[in-house]
Every structure is written in structure tokens, then in C-alpha cells.
Image: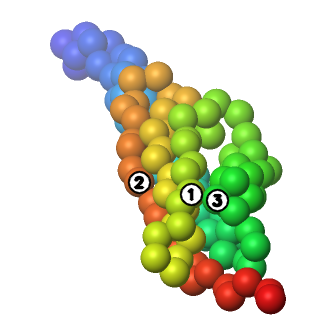
Amino acid sequence: MHQASARCEDGQASVTMLLTVGVLFIVFMTMVNVLLFVYARGVVRAAVDEGARAGSFANASAGECVSRAQNALDDLLGGPLGDNIAVACAVIGEEMVATANATLTSPIPGVGSWSFTLEGRARNEDPIP
């Protein structure tokens, strides 16, 4: 009778191991996704700051602000992750304001997207007479 009950438990460790590995894989992929989104947010933050600085130079335009921000995004966040990011610049008072509206879509199926808006500001320089 002892041998019969031992045979019924064969393979139990395999099932437990498979479940454990599956849960650890999901946790690992979630962490990778969070790190990817945090990196992308940092890139967008740097791009709007760079665009606002470029647009704040004397005799610069909002177009130069958008161009510089878009170049930073293209350099650091190319590919599908950076596809849904729109940058706009405008002079408001004495400042150049760069605004980015972003929707980051995860490359992992079944994981939701993250939308946010970031703004960068830089005081305009006085034009050279």
C-alpha cells in the first residue's frame, strides 16, 4: 500500500515547478515593461526640455523647438514605442513651451498602454539688436 501511494505522487514536483516558472516569467516581463515605460518617459522629458531650450534662443521659432524635440525622440526612442508621441511648441509670454502628448503601447501582448502629457519651458532670450 505504501508503494501505491508513492506512485500517485509522481510528477507533482513538475507541476509545481511549471507553475512557479510561469509566475516568475510573468513577474519578470511585467518588470521589463515597467522599466521600458520609465525609460520612454525619461526620453520624452528630455526631448521636451531640449526642444524648449532650442526654441528659446534669440530669433528661434516654435518650428525649431518641435524639430529639436522630434530629433531627440527619433534618436533615443525609435521604433514602434515612439510612434504615438506628438510634440507641439508655442511661445507663451516670455517662455517657449514644448508639450508632448504620449501614448506608450507595450510590446507585450495583453499589457495595457500608458498615456501622459509632459511640458518643458525655457525663458526666451532677448533678440540680438
Quadrant of image for the N terminus: top left
- Label 3 vs 1, first from the N-terminus: 3
User: Residue 107, position in %: x, y?
Assistant: 55, 30
* Label 1: few (<14), some (14–19) or many (≥20) C-alpha neighbours in 10 Å: many
Q: CA distance from mark 3 to mark 1?
A: 5 Å
The reply to whether dot 1 and dot 2 touch (C-beta < 8 Å) is no
Q: x, y percentage for residue 59? A: 76, 73
Disc 2: CA contacts within 10 A as few (<14), some (14-19) or many (>=20): some
Query: Callout 3, which amino acid?
Result: Ala
Q: Quadrant of residue 11?
A: top left
Which one is in front in this view, the residue at disc 1 or the one at disc 2?
A: 1
- Picture quarter with the C terminus: bottom right
CA gap, disc 2 and disc 3: 18 Å
Q: Is residue 24 left or right of residue 57?
A: left
Q: Is residue 61 above or below residue 87?
A: below
The tag earlier along the polypeptide, 1 or 2, is 1
In the structure shown, which secondary structural element does the residue marked by tag 3 occupy? helix
Secondary element type, mark 1: strand
Residue 74 or residue 87, whichever sits in front: 87
Who's the residue at 53% across and 77% down the image? Answer: 95
User: In the image, what residue occupies the spot 51% across and 29% down?
Assistant: 108
Instruction: Indicate left or right for 48 with 19 as reference.
Output: right
Query: Is residue 24 depicted above or below 72 in this figure?
Result: above
- CB atoms at circles 3 and 1 under 8 Å apart? yes
Specify whether residue 16 is in view: yes
Left or right for 85, reference 3:
right
In the rendered structure, find residue 117 and report the number of the disc placed on it: 2
What residue is shown with label 1? 89
Which residue lies at the image location 41% right of the left edge and 54% below the top edge? 117
- Amino acid type shown at disc 1: Cys
